[in-house]
Image: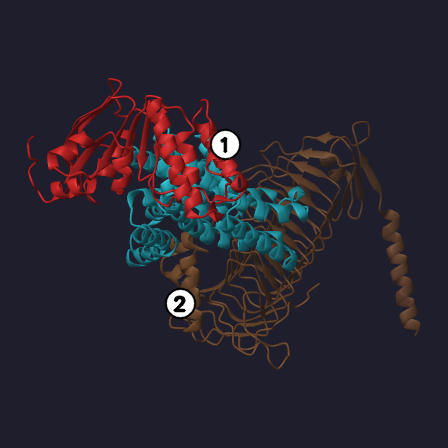
Chain colours: A brown, B cyan, C red
Amino acid sequence: MKLSTALVTCVIILSGLTASRATTLTVCTTCPATTIRAAIAQAAAGDTVLVRAGFYQEGNLVIDKPLTLRGIGYPVVDGQLTEETFTIAADDVTLEGFKIQNAGHNQLKDLAAIRVQRKKGYIIRNNLIINSFFGIYLEYSGQGLVIGNTISGQATNEMSAGNAIHAWYTKEVVIRDNLLQGHRDGIYLEFVTHSTIHDNRSTGNIRYGLHYMFSNDDAYFCNTFDHNGAGVAVMFSKRITMTDNVFEYNWGRAAYGLLLKEINDADILRNRFTHNTMGICLEGTTRIRYTDNTFSGNGWALQLSGGCDDNVFTRNNFLNNALDLVVNGRLNNNLFAHNYWREYSGYDLDRDGIGDVPYRPVKLFSHILTLAPEAIVLLRSLFTDLLNFSEKVNPLYTPNNILDNQPLMQLIPHD
Amino acid sequence: MLKIMRYTLSDLLRSRWVVIYLSFFLLLTLSLLSLSGDVSQVVISLMNIILILCPLVAVMFGVMFFYNSREFTELLLAQPLRRTDIFFGQYLGLALSLSASLVIGVGLPFLIYGLFASAEVWNFMVLIVIGVALTFIFSGLAFYLALCNDNRIRGFGLAILLWLFFAIIYDGIFLLSLIVLRDYPLEHYAMAMTILNPIDLARILILLKLDISALMGYTGAVFHKFLGSLAGSILAFLALALWVVLPVWRIRWRALRKDF
Amino acid sequence: MIDIQNLHKSYGKLAVLRGIDLNLSQTGQISAILGPNGSGKTTLIKSILGLVIPDQGDIRMDGQTIKGQWAYRHHISYLPQIARFPENLTVTELLAMIKDLRSGPTDDDALIQLFGLGPHLQKRLGDLSGGTKQKVNLVIAFMYDSPVIILDEPTSGLDPVAMIHLRELLQRARQQGKIILLSTHIMSFVDEMADEVVFLLEGAIRFRGTLVQLKTQYQEDNVERAIANILQGESPILA
């Protein structure tokens, strides 16, 4: 008892000491410090640097001690397209309230507006990052928080653009409430684990809204991905949980809501896929549960390519998609049950809410498309309707192992 | 020409068949709109019906009208009138009366439901314009067929065959050829085949407006380039316009040479 | 006024007219074209109207060729063989239509009264009987004051009263100095009304002359018998 009291007292005194030692420096044109660089140099660990509104033509600002840098009224830091603006080179740095523009573009060096190198405990908050190559670049840096930033690029092609948020060999990062647009990928994660991505909006990025490579045990939820080359791509990753996201208007040539490639053991729950060229494209995915998602107004709702095994699709709504399901190659052991298919025209005599005849989500026309993709010009023609109808009456070509044996009669209310 | 058109129109607008056609579209559109709240879904359903029904009704009604008015046409030909004026007048009257049924039958329910203020109005307009274009094309083709065949049975048979060909057989051959030739690059071929069939062309134009261009684009760069661009849409509309002109040109050619 | 020279027409292999030369210039005269079925009567009439386009030969009206022309038809009134009209128009609308299409003074009111069409004026043409439609047909043919009248089987479907009116109309037209060309199968009608006979057989004119000439040449006092004689190939007995 005594020992613990002493300890607590000790801690209080110690923390009091550090608090009393921490000071606040201010940067402005008439302040003692007129440059951010000077203020960082003067500041001691634990200090706060307040930067007043103004235009700071500074680059290569290396924050090498645990500081809080806070912009007041969005001071502009301009890298003049040649240099990286901020580098966080110490643990426990907070960087917030800056408008960072024109950080250097260099495809060899992957320059970024804010780079975190091998550090943890950082908070990057409420910054506006405009016209940078990479926006925020995290390498070997875990246990950080990226929140409330707006990162806008002007990327026009994949080759000459960087990602808005790029994380590499990083764990336990939280990325939330950001707006990411006009980059190659909105968020790119490679070798990132135990991280959470939520409540972001990723829009108008050339490649993907969110991109996982070789990353395991992550979750993303409540994000909106729209108007990207593809909403989200998850590749070569395990145990990713995807819930309550909106994938919409990822619409164009080779555009997907969600692209899954060589992943396994994931949960895809309560997401909404609307007006995407392809809702979800699956390649080599194993043991994935798709539950309570809604697919509406997509070109293709689902495309399953070879090597998709043991996937379970239950309680999903399929509404007004040009094609609900396209299958390429041989598949094993995928289960469709209790989904609602708007095109289902069966009956329910025992009135248990489940249709009495199975639904075949793969149309003959979908099958033909896999043989001759150009046949898409015959979409919705009378001839293909007749083909589909005859196949429905007497199935010959469509796979026998893809059936919903318990199709629901009523739309599943989500939300 | 305009006088003949006006009298043909005032005759046909009172004809039983045109009234039935109009009521069909009225009932259909009303029931679709009341059953489904999703207007774009209604537009797609209507598209499927218009693409099939407009050509069918136009060819059947076209040959029927021609044969029924044959004797009166002779009387008109004996009057001091140009042959082309008589036939173009009759053709326009025929096509316009069917088009009016379509426009009113589909348009009125949209008006009642107050949908002309909604964003769907452009999709609806495209649908109507294309339905009208199909009506003109196929009533013109039917008129031409009837001009070429004095035997009614043969004329009706050919009219049905014409419809069957463009609505189904053509697409069947098209699809089969795509499958057989699948090892070759087929995009240009597929585009050309689409333009050569007015029903396919009309369908693609509506689908484009319903924003399925991306879907088309997914399969190949040519589709994307052609269908995704404004120039492509204009070209497709021009092709449709050519299809409207073609029967008119053939009617003129035949009408100037035919014996009655 | 109407001058037909060397007119040929064939449908496929079937030669219907083989070199017809015919001049109709005598005003105030009714010429009857006679001949068995398929002899080319209707084709000849339709050639004059421009409905049939000849393979060879020329038709001139008032010295002008009619080939490719249409305005000359202002000078012709025509009664087609079969009376069929747009079914959903009324008689009044039909007459208004014809008057609208072909301007000029008309006396349709008198003709309507003559044929007793008054009560039918507001009926749909599709609801009229064949005889009534033929009367409407006659009204259209006679309502214009044109110098040439061409009638294809004018007597078909007419009741006796209407026949009497038709005869009156033809008499009046003759008195007005018109050129009248008609085809018919009713020989008594020819005997009574025609001034001259043009007999066609297999696309050629076998006989042309007045009724008196016909009867004297074939030594019959009745047209029907005279015609039968032509058909049997008896050569005319020259007087």
Left or right of C43? Residue A52 is right
On screen, residue A345 above or below C148: below
Q: Chain of mark 1?
A: C
Kindly state the secondary structure of the residue where label 1 is placed: helix
Image quarter in which the N terminus of chain C is found: top left
- Density class for disc 2 (Cα within 10 Å; few <14, some 14-19, many ≥20) is few
Q: Residue furthest bottom?
A: A350
Relative depth, front residue between B53 and A50: B53
Task: Examine the rendering and report whether any part of residue B257 can be seen.
Answer: no
Please tell me in which quadrant of the rendered image residue B231 appears: top left
Which residue does the numbered mark 2 point to in the structure image?
A: A329
Residue type at numbered disc 1: Ala
| SS state under label 2 | loop
Q: CA distance from mark 1 to mark 2?
A: 72 Å
Q: Which residue is mark 1?
A: C96
| Residue A19 coordinates in the image, percent (x, y) | 87, 51
Q: Is C63 on the left-hand or right-hand side of C228? A: right
Amino acid at dot 2: Gly
Instruction: Name the residue: 36% across, 22% down.
Output: C176
**Disc 2: which chain?**
A
Q: How many marks?
A: 2
Q: Can you say which quadrant of the picture contains the C terminus of chain C?
A: top left
x and y, in percent, of residue C181 in the image: 28, 31
Residue in the picture at 29% in, 37% down: B254
- Asked whether A167 or A152 is in front, the reply is A152
On screen, residue B54 versus residue A127, left or right, reads left
Q: Is residue C217 in view from this perspective?
A: yes
List the single residue furthest toward the top: C63
Q: Nearer the viewer, residue B166 or A23?
A: B166
